[in-house]
Image: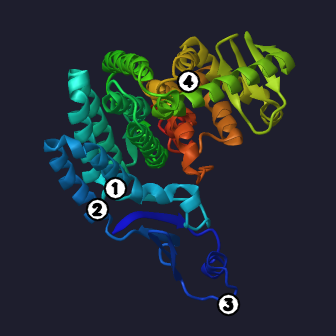
Amino acid sequence: MRVYRERRPLEWPPDIVARRLFEDSERRERTETRCRGLFRTDIRIDETDGAVVTTVRTPGAGVLAAVAAVVAIAAVFYPSIRIPVLWFCALAVAGPMAHLLPPLDARPSVGRVRSRRLTGVSAPAFVAIVGLLWVGIRPELGGVATVLCGSLLAIGTGCYVVAAGWRIESVSALWLAVAGLLPAVASVSNLAVAAALFGDATSMGAVLASVGFAIFSFLLVVAYCLLVYDAVAEASFEPFASGRFRAVAFLGYLLVVGVLCLTAFRLTGRVLTTAPWPVVVTALSPFGLPVGGWLADTGGTLLARSRILHHGDRRDIDGVTLLVVNAPGTHVRAVPFPQCVVVTRSVVERLSREELMAVIAHERHHLRARDRLAATLATLVAAPVGRNALTAFLDYPARERAADRHAADTAGPGPLVRALRRLGGPSSGKTAGRDRNPLTAPYALFYGPIIDTATYRSLEDRIAAVTPPPDGRR
């Protein structure tokens, strides 16, 4: 049963790729099969499409998942077997995804990944887990259990659809908001399982079951973050609704996050009274993905801002404070506290004064429209779900287009277009710089530059939006 498939474009001639892949200087074949544990990896060089196609198979994965669903139905009527069945279903779901982990990774490292597809062979087992979870925790949590399991099922179903290869050119930014809820839902699920298993007593079986389920859910979140990140990074963003509806949806989203956090807090205190603290720490491990990213992102931002304010070359241009810093690359960023525009020295050296004024006008519009302020506030409160999940409720494409129009009206479209061409816009190659390690995918999904790079499909789109047509009409 095929569980995984990916394509990587060739970066060298097929003969060179074949020799590098198969570690044989005389090799001319274009296929190879590698076996590692339960997984069989088929590698094929497709010269017609110019790609390396990797397919991972495991025997009986679909049958195992189907059996898990059938056995789970029996466990609903026989409570004594629910814990071992929960283990069985967890293994049925995690098994096909285990090859994503670096120690089991047998995939080639030639070229960047163009697409990943994880089939839905473990979907029946995943549904069985959610059903068993609902049956087990409903007596303890009541209606909260129904909402919790319904959310987990909805998020899991969406992730399966994305992982199975659903790719479109434009996606809703709401995907990031939904993905941000997954660590919180998984952590609450882990705590609910621990509360149901321990009851009023502590046993080694309960410890092993709760810890095992928590580790499984952590790996599940990591794998889904990798696949959702791949799908989102390949598309441009579109706002999912009008401004007023997004505001209402944002308030509702904050309410859901608040309920999840309060439920986690309540369950944590409850589990601590009967379970050892390592069980609680393991149960909260999915929460550590966005929270750890928040600590790293906020700490790095504060440290970088402190260095900029103390060591930056301060200049006043047209009523705007410009901080020039010695850093690699060409970067421009508006900072709300204190209000200034930070640029790297290469930007100042590369642009003429008119072009620099166009760039400053663009960033000044962001400051006046409080775009950067909203992003900064989102960063400060984003620990439970990630910054990108909250800023997904902003219409970034519209804000960027408004800033470009303001710069074109203030400094003229010519200087702005020249500045954009000299500096380069957001990369149209969404896969550039992507890390193969799935353990970095949650940070990239929650705090990476996905929204920035997906705002425009290419630099030419920005130039076309500010360049008047030949007849002079916009």
Task: Identify the element where label 4 is drawn.
Answer: helix
Q: Is residue 128 left or right of residue 302?
A: left
Amino acid under disc 4? Ala
Picture residue at 63% right of the left edge, 68% below the top: 11
Q: Earlier in the sequence, mark 3 or mark 1?
A: 3
Tell me how far mark 3 sits from mark 1, CA to CA.
41 Å
Between marks 4 and 1 in the image, the one whose residue lies nearer the viewer: 1
Picture residue at 42% right of the left edge, 31% below the top: 187
The picture places residue 92, in percent across and down from the top left corner, at 34, 56
Q: Earlier in the sequence, mark 2 or mark 4?
A: 2
Q: Earlier in the sequence, mark 4 or mark 3?
A: 3
Tell me how far mark 4 sits from mark 3, CA to CA.
57 Å
Query: Mark 1 and mark 4 in contact (Cβ < 8 Å)?
Result: no
Read off the residue under disc 2. 64
Scheme of image coloration: rainbow
The picture places residue 382, in percent across and down from the top left corner, at 51, 22
The picture places residue 194, in percent across and down from the top left corner, at 37, 31
Query: Is 211 in front, or is 12?
Result: 211
Amino acid under disc 2? Leu
Amino acid under disc 3? Glu
Picture residue at 45% right of the left edge, 28% below the top: 389
433 over 11 or under it: above or below: above
Tell me how far mark 4 sits from mark 1, CA to CA.
50 Å
Tell me how far mark 1 sits from mark 2, CA to CA.
6 Å
Amino acid under disc 1? Ala
Q: Is any atom of residue 398 visible in this view?
A: no
Give the quadrant of residue 16: bottom right
Between marks 4 and 3 in the image, the one whose residue lies nearer the viewer: 3
Read off the residue under disc 1. 92
Read off the residue under disc 3. 26
